[in-house]
Amino acid sequence: MLSDSQKKFDREHIWHPYTSLTNPMPVYAVESANGVKLKLDDGRELIDGMSSWWCAIHGYNHPTLNAALQAQISKMSHVMFGGITHEPAIELCKRLVDMTPVGLEKVFLCDSGSISVEVALKMTFQYWHSLGKTEKGKLLTIKKGYHGDTFGAMSVCDPEGGMHHLFAPMLPQHVFMKEPTSSFAEGLNQTEQDELENTFKNHHHEIAAFILEPIVQGAGGMRMYSPEYLVKARELCDRYDVLLIFDEIATGFGRTGELFAANHADVSPDIMCVGKALTGGMLTMAATICTSKVAETVCAGEAGVFMHGPTFMANPLACAVSIASLDILASGAWKEQVRNIESWLESGFKSLAINANVKGVRVLGAIGVVECKQDIDTAEIQKYFVEKGVWIRPFRNLIYLMPPYIAQEEDIAKLCAAIGGSLEYEHHFKLKTTVEIEQ
Ligand SMILES: *Cc1c(COP(=O)(O)O)cnc(C)c1O
């Protein structure tokens, strides 16, 4: 159990994600985690609805993942990757090349999702530099997106939700398109088609790459859209000579019901970012995977090399645990697990969809979203969730679930019931009504 002085130190000295140090949000002390449960230091157990932000797909304290780390730690925890290679890196990259959409062949291992986006952007600009097309100096993206917190990544996040104005003097200006308005089950609509075609026609000469989260826009609003949008994006990128970058950091490794969201559309990007669930949630690691054409063009340029190389590149512990996590996925059980979670979420959300405080619900794979009419008071609602024995962390007007794939029917039922109960209390909502999302 944390002492009062430890808690005081946390409040006074430690930043948590997106929080104030002068008026911090409450935090809960977790002592251990096992399976789908987080155990608080007062002994209470919570069913985890978040997979620690998309990462812990196999649940916590998984014996296979633990064993992979233990085996690797006794050989070497880390060694530089410049001038050195090792089996964990080779075996991991082999698996990534095999499992990712066809054409993605060359792997750059990075420390985190945001960095993998930076790497993708640098590859893009080196690519056009090599071809002497330096007028291609901008990126194209869609609104309501999220690509990370570093400067390059932030410059393609949603201009409003991403708080661009705070950093405006330091952010490059890119081209933003209206976000897709179709749902997952629909086809490409006329508005989307016009927006895509007009933007490409008007801007292609200055556009280096089109970057987007395929099928599911995560932290920018938990929105889901038509696979046909990706087919159209690929077609236009080919027609107008623009690279296509898929940020699969949230969607990758089975979460949407396919191994990668790109598989719903059977489209291959030129560059793809993966992260989050790559290590099964055990360590930080991401990868940027590109086609042979991108890699060869980058290396044919003035520098002759790709200009990036983090200190902890290809960390052997992270590689070893990623291999173990991908091997669990390769056994194939995830597919039925995700399909089951999808149907349990669909039935659990039925009664929520008609609640007076709810604007709409949507489910895809092991992702469930309850969009409320008003913004949520996260601290208040979280107190309720913890009392009900679940861990759910809403943002803005969104209560969402992305549980570990090992979650059972009763776990999902408990998560859904807690959300249903939480909607009955006015003090869980802020008075302000959120900007209507047009869809
Ligand atoms: C989380 C996320 C990132 C950033 O990854 P970090 O590991 O937090 O840097 C980038 N893109 C998407 C789609 C994400 O969900």
Image (tube, helix red, strand yellow):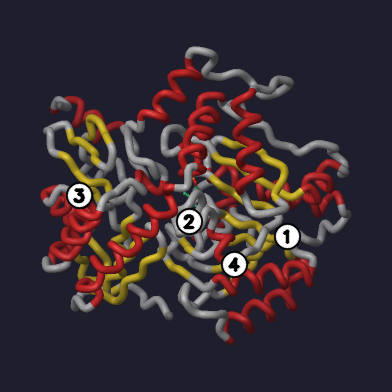
| Disc 4 residue type (three-letter) | Ala
Q: Between residues 19 and 396, which one lies in front from this camera angle?
A: 396
Q: Quadrant of the N terminus?
A: top left
Give the distance between the C-alpha atoms of the residues marked 1 and 2, in whole angstroms. 29 Å
- Using a 10 Å C-alpha cutoff, classify the residue at mark 2 as few (fewer than 14 neighbours), some (14 to 19) or many (20 or more): few
Up/down of 337 relative to 62, above or below: below
Q: Disc 4 vs disc 2: which is toward the camera? A: 4
Give the distance between the C-alpha atoms of the residues marked 1 and 4, in whole angstroms. 17 Å
Q: Quadrant of the C terminus?
A: bottom left
Q: Which residue is mark 2?
A: 166
SS label for mark 2: helix
Q: Which residue is mark 1?
A: 243
Picture quadrant of residue 376: bottom left
Q: Which residue is mark 3?
A: 390
Answer whether labels 1 and 2 touch (C-beta < 8 Å).
Answer: no
Give the mark nearest the N terminus, 4 or 2: 2
SS label for mark 3: strand
100 to the left or right of 394:
right
